[in-house]
Amino acid sequence: MTSIVPKEQSSESTKDLSTEEHEDFRLFGLIAFLIADGMTFAGFFAAYLTFKAVNPIGPDAVYELELPLPTLNTVLLLLSSFTFHRAGKFLEKNQSKECQKWLLITGSLGLAFLISQMFEYFTLPFGLTDNLFASTFYALTGFHGLHVTLGSIMIMIIWWQTRVPSGRVNNENKFPFEAVELYWHFVDGIWVVLFIILYLL
Amino acid sequence: MTISLKPGNTPPEKLQPTGWLKYLSFSLDHKVIGLQYLVCGFFFYLIGGSLAGAIRVELTSPLSDFMPREVYNQVLTLHGTIMIFLWIVPVVNGAFGNYLIPFYVGARDMAFPRLNAVAFWLIPPSGLMLITSYFINGAAQSGWTAYPPLSITTPAAGQIIWILSVLLLGGSSIFGGINFIATILKLRRPGLKLMQLPMYCWAMLGTSILVVLSTPVLAGTLILLSFDIVAHTGFFNPSLGGNVIVYQHLFWFYSHPAVYIMVLPAFGLVSEILPIHSRKPLFGYTTMVFSIMGIVVLGLVVWAHHMFTSGTPPWMRLFFTIATAFIAVPTGIKFFNWVATLWGGKISLNAAMLFSCGFIINFVLGGITGVALAQVPFDVHVHDTYFVVAHFHYIVYGGSVFVIFSSIYHWFPKFTGKMLNENLGRFHFIITFIGFNLCFAPQHWLGLNGMPRRVAEYDPQFQLINQISSVGALLMALSTLPFLWNILQSILYGDEAGDNPWNALTPEWLTSSPPPVENWEGEAPLVLEPYGYGEKDSTKTQEQLK
Ligand code: HEM
Ligand SMILES: [Cu+2]
């Protein structure tokens, strides 16, 4: 009967997990969360595409969607993914002033995206309840905008927390930073898909 | 670094409330949270059961004389919603998952204790909200499926409350799922491999994957539905150019997997109980693992078998029929593995074992009618009749609820340190089993002969069978009494259970009953063969095994 290993033999293996392994499992939880979040979008996309396939009344038929603003938005978000990455590099080198600068730029880009999306909403010639396309359009972009809003808030929190000496996020405790970064890249990725499906298809 | 960030370490708050008061507090202890889920779930089961009783009373006569039609619809909707979202899902996942999984992976707590507590505390308020909606402005009337256009056109208040509470409950189960995935995959005690985990871990891993992939789709769908109700958008409203079929696809993309969210954990629990009470190793561990994963994958691609009568095109019907039939393969494998586990074992027919065996029998019957329903011509004939009602009650009641009772009999000594009365338990089983079959077996006949579901009035020719069914329901209701009495008696005056009354090898039994806050005094045991039973050791005590 070897099913239970006696206590003496196994003592070294019960030590508490090291910080590294520990971050590993939090990352796992985060990824599971992002998959769940992504599935919400997947459901919305599927609904939108089916509506479009079976019931093609929408601005496409009546009016064209303008491209300049959403293209600008795409550029803003992709840029912000890059600047977030830069901030991470500086965090690793313990240069928290530089890191904070890049985080601030990232946050501002998120804010710029939101302002530009507002602007787009005001210039669009259709409202939420005008037709099926309009409703799905606003539901999708609105839900994504909500994600950008939350992300921007979290970036600002991280920015506050990377201060030296009193901030709580630094090279030793990087996980909050990495978590927000992963979330932000995820939101950007969703936008690219959304841009292609909504504006280009 | 704060202490709460260290996994496997107890956050200090966990130690604060003591005695039974800790069950009413925001405790972070996975064992407390597990029991909170269990008791809260049982509370809602009593409410949902009373509603079922009301439905059965109404159906003893062909006229709608006991309650008006809208009330019948509200009661029906509340019954279905409560039973699914507030009883089975939270209990087979939340209650037993939280209690057992940390033991099984050799951890001192779940990966995210705070998230865990939040996930539980979302449940009581949303459940109460759902029920009070009945008194405020009339509860939702469109059944637990909330199909539009009915759900858009009936009075809005109840439907909106329904949506809100289902969204909160969905959020709770997503948080739970994330927690289980991280705990099972990443919190395992060093030296313990995935293929050495008890089967319930695998079942919970599969279930959590389903939860994470499908529940968010339901959430999105319900958000769109609430837009239709509040903002008068037209996503699912045909008169505004919307499409109800899209709702059905999205809804069933969640709700078919939801069946497995209710029944896969039950599979896992049965796989823990059978080997212990028959003193034999679990038969075919590896095939069990693969069949769980097979069910997960297939479960995600068969949703449209609920929509054969919704104008689905023929290629779709063919695809979904075949995919559904394939699910019978992994399910059948599991069935044969359980039977093989029992075969030639030293079976003790205690209450836990009886309920598990009852589960196997009921589940086979429910499975057979399920495969029948996947055949389009047959489904077109019995769709939305009592045949379907009979089928899914064989699965959810005969399957999951039987397993919940079995698990309570099995783990009660661990939860409380007291033994339950076996004779009362066997008595409980016999009445439940008879009542259950008396209630739901005749409904197959009703359905085949064309009695539609979700109606308060029916053709008088069905009266006798309906009355038989109601008698069965009465028996089931009565069977709760010996159960509750047994629990009460045992908590107050029960025999001391000792640490390991069943001589089991799974890790939760290798600590005291009830276990200490940190799960083990000293370090966690490393159990590499959770099913290492055999002829010889069946007489050995746990001391000798060590
Ligand atoms: C206590 C024993 C139970 C009895 C006597 C009972 C009885 C009934 C009856 C008569 C209906 C109406 C069927 C119709 O007209 O469509 C019904 C519906 C339903 N029951 Fe039960 N039931 C019981 C337990 C459960 C359990 C444990 C579940 C767990 C999931 C459950 C889930 C449902 C669902 C989902 C519906 C459909 C509701 C709807 O169509 O919106 N029932 N039940
Ligand atoms: Cu199904």
Image (cartoon, grey):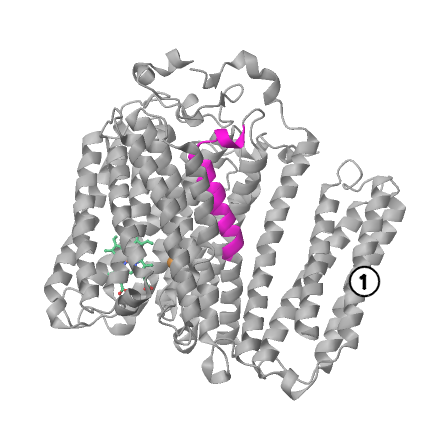
Occupied quadrant, residue A187? bottom right
Quarter of the picture holding the C terminus of chain B: top left
Please identify the quarter of the rendering in which residue B418 is found.
top left
| Residue type, label 1 | Leu
Q: Which residue is mark 1?
A: A109
Residue A99: x percent and y percent?
85, 48
Residue B267 seen: yes
Mark 1 neighbour class, 10 Å CA radius: few under 14, some 14 to 19, many 20 or more: many
Label 1 SS: helix
Question: Which quarter of the rendered picture does the N terminus of chain B lie within?
Answer: top right
Task: Give the residues in magenta.
Answer: B193-215
Left or right of residue A201, residue A135 in this image: left
Q: Residue at x 69, y 55 (%)?
A: A186
Instruction: Name the residue nearer the viewer: B258 or B34.
Output: B258
Q: Tell me residue A43's x, y (percent).
A: 55, 64
When asked about the image quadrant of residue A91, the answer is top right
Q: Eyeballing the image, is B362 above or below A173?
A: below
What residue is rendered at 70% in x and 74% in y?
Answer: A199
